[in-house]
Image (tube, rainbow, N blue to C red):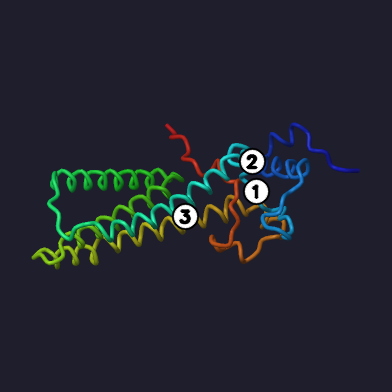
Amino acid sequence: MEAVIDKSALLRMSQAERRELASLLAALDEPAQAGTVGAEPDPDRADPFRVDPLLRRERPLALIVSAACCLFLAGWIVVLAATLPHHFDAHHWRAVWVNFDVFLLAAFAATAWAIWRERQVLILLLMFTGTMLCCDAWFDVGTSLATSGLWISLASAVGAELPLAFLAFAGAWQLLRATVLAGILAGASRAGAFREASCSLRRTPLAGGGLDEALPRRMTV
């Protein structure tokens, strides 16, 4: 006699188990599409473009915009390299740097809050903070070339800004990898289909089973 999942059994399931069951039912109703020509469909992959139809419609547009930005920026870099002057008097210099440091302070504060509250948005905040630290080091050193403040800028970049940026990027990578392995590939691991290649974010297909977990949880009182 075949086992039947009734309403009481569904209520006993966890949210992750119900989501996995819904993904399996959707896979049965809709034929899986291979990611590349000639590739075999992967039943353990949760396709975000099937979970969210809006993503499927926006994907070609996003690809075109990204490629167009690459082409435009490549040409713009050539134009800047040929036309920008070697020396330029910048206006509102103090306001620019003070406002930048205010934003950097806000990024650190938001990151500290996400660490304390254990929010998934921490991945984005770490990437944002690390990027700002790299920009800070770049412009500190670049604008102090041929000045007496060059060594101070270099010491600040090498001793503080770049190491902190590296820690932020490494932390974001580890959190993202752990999220993929624990949230998206858990079902494949239980089914015995877990592959060592999936440990690499570069080789792991884009997955949509963990879109809910990618958002910050609601604050608890």
Q: Residue 86 location, x and y as percent? A: 17, 61
Q: Secondary structure at mark 2?
A: helix
Q: Amino acid at mark 2?
A: Val
Whole-angstrom CA distance, mark 2 to mark 1, is 8 Å
Describe residue 14's horizontal placement relative to residue 179 as left or right: right
Q: Residue at x 54, y 60 (%)?
A: 201
Quick one: label 3, few (<14), some, or many (20+) residues within 10 Å? Answer: some
Q: Residue 192 location, x and y as percent? A: 71, 60
Please, is residue 18 above or below residue 191 in the view? Answer: above
- Name the disc covering residue 46, or none: 1
Q: Amino acid at mark 3?
A: Leu
Q: Residue at x 58, y 41 (%)?
A: 55
* Position of the N terminus by quadrant: top right
Q: Residue at x 38, y 54 (%)?
A: 73
Of mark 1 and mark 3, the one earlier in the sequence is 1
Whole-angstrom CA distance, mark 1 to mark 3, is 19 Å
Of mark 2 and mark 1, the one earlier in the sequence is 1
Whole-angstrom CA distance, mark 3 to mark 2, is 23 Å
Q: Residue 93 location, x and y as percent? A: 14, 47
Q: Amino acid at mark 1?
A: Ala
* Position of the C terminus by quadrant: top left
Q: Mark 2 near mark 1, Cβ–Cβ under 8 Å?
A: yes
Please, is residue 162 above or below residue 1 in the view? Answer: below
Labels 1, 3: front one: 1
Quick one: label 2, few (<14), some, or many (20+) residues within 10 Å? Answer: some
Query: Where is mark 3, residue-wise?
Result: 175
Q: Residue at x 76, y 42 (%)?
A: 30
- Name the disc covering residue 51, or none: 2
Q: Secondary structure at mark 3?
A: helix
